[in-house]
Each structure stands twice: as C-alpha cells, then as structure tokens.
C-alpha cells in the first residue's frame, strides 16, 4: 500500500510517482510514453506474468479483471517495476479469454501500443509452442494422473482450446497493419 507518511526519512516515493505519471495518459502523451515506459517498467517480465493471468482466464488478477491479486515491486538494482502475481485461484473459467483485457484503462493503453502488442504476441506464441502446448504438457500430466489418480484430461483440453484461441488472435493481428 502507498502510505506516503510511513518512514519518510527512508522511503523514496519518486519511482512510484514517476510510474503513475508515465502511465497516466493525461500527463504522458503516447510518443513520450513509448520512450519512457521500458525505463521504468520491466515490460517483458510484466507481459509474461500478465499473459499467464490472461490465458488462464484469471478474472481476479491485476490488469485483467478486478485489478488486484498482483503487486508491483520496484527493483532497486535495475530501477524498474516488476509484476508479482499472487492468489491465482479464479482461473480456467473461460477457454477463449479476451487477449487484451480492458478492465484497467492504463494497462489497456499499454497493451494497445503497436510495439507492445508485437512483443505480447511473441510471448504468447512462445507459450503455445512450449509449455502451454497440450502435446508438451501431456506426458507430465499423464504422469501426474498415474501417480495421483487425479484426472488431467480437462487440463489438456483447456490448453488445446486456448491454444487455438491464441493462434486465431495472432493470425488476426498478422493481418492488421501496425
């Protein structure tokens, strides 16, 4: 929580204030936003975390639905913000989730930037060609099912269905002019 009166002699709120100002479209026009955002937000890390929350249909996630269950943490080494998820329990309810959620206007603005969209689609493509693939996950899930008796077929079905949904989103974006 942002409590500016807490430990004022130790805490430096300038990075948080800068993040808020850059994310605020009223203060930072798109051209300036594009120039500044990667110097204050670890964009690839942010998109990787957000992508998992999106494709698992985690409607209770920061930037996806209710706008919580995630924490922005300032990395004092590289001076950029990182997204850390928590409470990932409202998931797998929709195998065709909105790939670009609009619940948070500033996150929607970020993801609407053409160069950010390209990076996001590259991340999604990496997911579906890797661990998000039902083919890749099936041997592990079969071993889990054998060891525990828990049926994993619905997980493979979810992975396969969301993969098709993501592939369709990528194909549609490739047809669009950026």
Image (cartoon, helix red, strand yellow):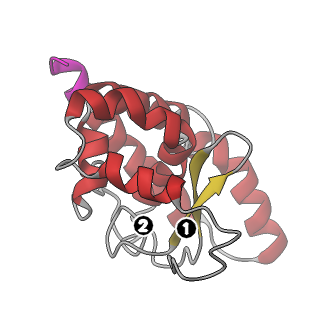
Q: 9 left or right of 170?
A: right
Indicate the position of residue 165 as horizontal and vertical percent values.
31, 44
| Whole-percent x, y for residue 65 in the image | 31, 70
Distance, label 2 to label 1, CA atoms, is 8 Å
Q: Could you tell me which residue is drawn at 24 percent across and 65 percent down?
A: 103
Q: Compared to 156, does 122 lie above or below?
A: above
Given this view, does label 2 or label 1 mark the residue nearer the observer?
Answer: 1
Which residue bears the numbered disc 2?
62
Residue at image coords 35%, 63%: 64
If the image is split into quadrants, where does the C terminus sit? top left
Whether residue 84 sits left or right of residue 92 in the image: it is right
Helix, strand or loop for disc 2: loop
Q: Position of residue 164 (x, y in %)?
A: 35, 41
User: Closest to the observer: 103 or 163?
Assistant: 103
Residue 64 in view in this figure: yes
Foreground residue among 156 and 115: 115
Residue 158, relative to residue 89: is it above or below?
above
Magenta stretch holds residue 171 = no
Q: Which residues are magenta?
A: 172-178
Q: Is residue 22 left or right of residue 123?
A: left
Residue plotted at (43% across, 51% down): 19
Packing grade of label 1 (10 A; few <14, some 14-19, many >=20) is: some
Residue 174 sits inside the magenta stretch = yes
At 26% from the left and 52% from the top, the residue drawn is 24
Q: Based on the displayed image, in which of its 4 quarters is residue 73 positioned?
A: bottom right
Report the residue marked by disc 1: 71
Label total for image: 2
Q: Earlier in the sequence, mark 2 or mark 1?
A: 2
Residue 157 in sight = no
Q: Secondary structure at mark 1?
A: strand
Check whether the beta carbons of the residues at disc 2 and disc 1 lie within 8 A of each other.
yes
């Amino acid at each position: 929580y942002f409590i500016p009166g807490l430990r004022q002699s130790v805490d430096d709120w300038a990075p948080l204030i800068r993040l808020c100002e850059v994310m605020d479209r009223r203060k930072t026009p798109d051209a300036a936003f594009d120039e500044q955002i990667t110097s204050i937000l670890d964009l690839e890390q942010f998109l990787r975390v957000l992508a998992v929350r999106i494709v698992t249909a985690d409607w209770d996630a920061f930037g996806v639905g209710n706008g919580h269950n995630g924490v922005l943490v300032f990395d004092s080494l590289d001076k950029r913000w990182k997204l850390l998820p928590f409470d990932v329990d409202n998931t797998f309810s929709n195998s065709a989730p909105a790939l670009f959620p609009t619940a948070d206007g500033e996150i929607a603005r970020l993801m609407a930037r053409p160069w950010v969209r390209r990076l996001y689609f590259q991340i999604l493509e990496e997911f579906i060609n890797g661990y998000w693939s039902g083919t890749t996950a099936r041997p592990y899930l079969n071993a889990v099912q054998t060891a525990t008796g828990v049926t994993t077929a619905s997980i493979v079905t979810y992975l396969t269905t969301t993969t098709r949904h993501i592939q369709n989103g990528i194909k549609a974006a490739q047809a669009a002019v950026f």
